[in-house]
Image: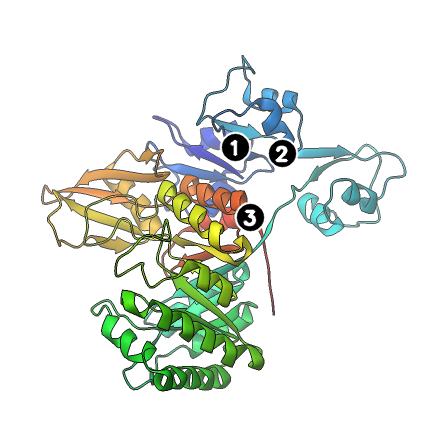
Amino acid sequence: MIIHVVSSGETLWQIANRYNANLNSIVQVNELANPNQLVIGQSIVVPSPSTSHVVKAGETLWLIAQQYDVSVNAIIRANQLQNPNLLYQGTRLIIPPITHIVQPGQSLWQIATRYSTTIQAIVNENQIQDPNLIHAGTSLLIPRRKPTIDVNAYTYQANEAAAARSINEVGHLLTYLSPFAYMITETGTLEPFPDSQAIAAAYSKRAVPMMSITNFTSTSLGSNLAHTILASPELSERVLTNALQVMDEKGYLGLNIDFENVLPEDRENYNQFLQRAVDRLHPRGYFVSTAVAPKTSGAQTGLLYTAHDYEAHGRIADFVVLMTYEWGYRLGPPRAISPIDQMRRVVEYAVSVMHPKKIFLGFQIYARDWTLPHVQGQSARTFGIQSAVNLAIRHGATIQYDEKAQSPFFRYVDDQGRQHEVWFEDARSAQAKFDLVKEFNLAGISYWALGYSYPQNWALLEDNFNIRKLI
């Protein structure tokens, strides 16, 4: 896949022609409502055996060529570089595909072994009809090695049928699916909610259903509720007993514990609750995961952070979801919702106290629209990524890109003359997050949340990773 950023006056036909790509394929993968309407700064994913690379500080062409297993000259030709020794940080390079010319007597098995790939991957990449019949002199595209990760997605769609549709659309790219959420009560019971269709859809896509329990809602912090449960061994056990009953009845295979706004004095109580959960669930063959606030150090304090003990969660739970989003809070001022520089700080701390293969990077897949000037407490509108792109097109807004946050944004004036600022995600910001997962060798990605259209993300996810399936 190639990521292309639209310049002034560019058409989709010109973009397709530049990369020798099929125009209809570009329309399809980006779900472009009107191929004739593009805006400056819009990112376009171009289906191609080539890929993109953004030059980092200190990189040379030789280092980049080594990383992608191609020659320096191949990169020079693909990008028509006049001075190969002069690379600028932030430049987006096209990396050509790996090709192999079949030699007399060579088999696909020999070729796959040479490039540390599989016969099936080569067959799929080249649409080979008969793997036993390949001719000398044939040029084959060799798929690049991709890391294998786990992918979780939460869904809180109120409409059961809509939730099932979202899962059916992207479930082939999910390892886990977590309907959100069973609300605990002060008596240790769990408030039921309709999740049967979501669970059925998850199983149909071989995504492991993961039950989620929580203490908060959009209108209640849940601090006192969490204290009531965590401070009482009896109530803690009752919550777990009720969770196990739901899991047995509905077919959940694991539990995700998302207690937020936990009082600082309940830190150790929370750790003990997690240990109780593991002690109860592991013998039954169930796994336990947690979701934690985005901390950047063990000394970070506050209602969101103190009680989330990263070292303990990483030691006790099977895996941990970093909720690396909501810097651009709906009630706060406009800013990137998931700025990569802040996400990196969280990951750097997390890997210092827990194994990277227990860490899921949180990835929000929605946009926010703030009215300007921002008034304290005024709520931003939350909606889908694709809707944000269409909004920019409708208003003819130039999409800008914050290099530090690795996040796109734009401004527009509505029909009432009010100014707005919109922060969202695009192909570039998704790729930056995927690169972070690769850099730190994390277990995977956790999406918050299904129900928002973001086609570029799913195309790039599949292009970057193999997704593990457990059922």
Find residue 441 and name its label. 3
Name which of mark 2 and mark 3 comes first in the sequence: 2
Q: CA distance from mark 3 to mark 1?
A: 19 Å
- Residue at label 2? 68
Of pointers 2 and 1, the one earlier in the residue sequence: 1
Picture quadrant where residue 81 is located: top right
Residue 414: x and y, percent?
15, 43
Q: Nearer the viewer, residue 42 or 98?
A: 98
Left or right of 75 in this view: 366: left
Measured from the top left, where is residue 92 in percent x and y?
Answer: 48, 28
**Left or right relative to 127: residue 93:** left
Quadrant of the image for the N terminus? Answer: top right
Report, in whole angstroms, how far the alpha carbon at label 2 lies from the one at label 1: 10 Å
Q: Which mark is residue 53?
A: 1
Q: Which amino acid, mark 2?
A: Tyr
Where is the C terminus found, in terms of image quarters? bottom right
Q: Amino acid at mark 1?
A: His
Mark 2 against mark 3, which lies toward the viewer?
Answer: 3
